[in-house]
Image: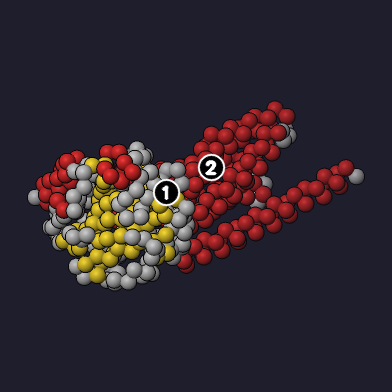
Amino acid sequence: MAMTRLLFSCCLFWGLALAAKFQTFTPLGPNGLIYSIHIPEATANTSNGPIYFQMNSTKRIEWFALGQGDHMAGSNMFVVYTSGNNVTVSPRSGVGHSQPLYNPAAQITVMNGSGVHGSMITANIKCDNCLHWGTATMDPTSSSSSWIWGVRYGPPLNTKKLSANILQHDIMGVHMVDLKNATGPTGANPFADLVSINDNPNADYPFKESGFHAKKIAHGALMIVAFVVMFPFSALILHLYSSSNIVTIHGGLQLLALVVSIAGLGLGVSMAQQVHVLDHYHVIIGIIVIASLTLFQPAMGLLQHRYFRKTGGKGPFAYIHRWFGRIMIILGVINVGLGFQFTGVGDPDAPRGAVIGVSVLICVIALFYVLRVGYVTKKQRRRASAEAD
């Protein structure tokens, strides 16, 4: 029964969106957040006038938001949270990875139909100055308009304060909207027929944000283990022990670290696809580092091994393998920090204590690595000097 009601709700949403010329998108699936955007014909024709958008959440949350732009900095945002059965729409200006600031210059009207309807939170918004904000503009006829969205799970804020403090999002993403297909005739309230399509507080929704959080924690744990512990130790072991099998052990540990990092990358890419942030620098750096370690680094190691078996010495491949590996490990460790920043330090998935603990571990391992490699290098130079004498 719950699934039937959910499917009916989705069909109704898209049916109404098609009839009334809305563009609707559901970034987390039809059970999470539902955004609908409408551009009046007069606004599209003159590049001046209001635009309308509806924001829905099918569950009680701390806050959720919609913004114009392709990233936080410089975006024109609207954050929705509840107070009892009423909604507060807080217009804000994005300032990067800090809390967006309340924007008193926004000219918005919270329209009829807004409120808490059973399990759904609805905000119907008319914005009279959303074509221009700060130094940015929006083309109401664009076929690929960038909109960002975000959500913070947790107990309702229960406040009417427009400048209320909000914690960082749990999930965010970017969505491209075809505003040409969102343009049409406009009545007094274009969203009147979209109000309260699902008022069942006990509906069973298939998407579980807990699954996303579990993937985020597993991704972080795997990457920390791989880049903070396993890769450095597998490199350091060459300078700790002297054995005929040490190269084989080194290769085996590197391979194991690579498997762990690939698993972490898989989870990361899966989450990035889910929330449409594959172009984020944290994701891009991760893909580059792991692809390089998978394809290039083992090849250099094998070539050096073959060179050593033929000549008994080090060739150019040894130095490329060594320094390229060090650079990739350092870049991977930096990306761990960028991952914490992306999630938000202090977030339940990135507790401040865990971030501090990982930072201390990185410093300890880095210091030990530098001291040990420096000691071994100095010892080898002394031995070479003594043999030369």
Query: Badge 2, how many Cα within 10 Å: few under 14, some, many 20+?
Result: some
Query: Which of pointers 2 and 1 indicates the residue nearer the eye?
Result: 1
Q: What amino acid type should be assigned to the residue bearing mark 2?
A: Val
The kind of secondary structure element at disc 2 is helix
Between the C-alphas of marks 2 and 1, the distance is: 36 Å
Q: What amino acid type should be assigned to the residue bearing mark 1?
A: Thr
264 left or right of 33? right
Quadrant (top left/top right/bottom left/bottom right) for the C terminus: top right
Q: Is residue 174 visible?
A: no
10 left or right of 309? left
- Residue 179, how many percent across, how many down? 31, 41
Image quadrant assignment for residue 310: top right
Q: Residue furthest left?
A: 1
Q: Which residue is mark 1?
A: 137
Depth check: 362 or 239 in front?
362
Total marks in image: 2
Give the residue at x 49% y 43%: 284
Q: Is residue 139 visible?
A: yes
Give the residue at x 26% y 43%: 41
Depth check: 329 or 113 in front?
113
Depth check: 18 or 211 in front?
18
Q: Residue furthest top?
A: 310
Q: Is residue 243 above or below residue 216?
A: above
Give the residue at x 19% y 43%: 20
- Residue 133, how many percent across, how many down? 42, 55
Q: Which residue is mark 2?
A: 289
- Residue 219, how many percent across, how many down? 42, 51
> Label for residue 148?
none
Q: Is residue 329 above or below residue 87?
A: above
Q: Residue furthest right?
A: 389
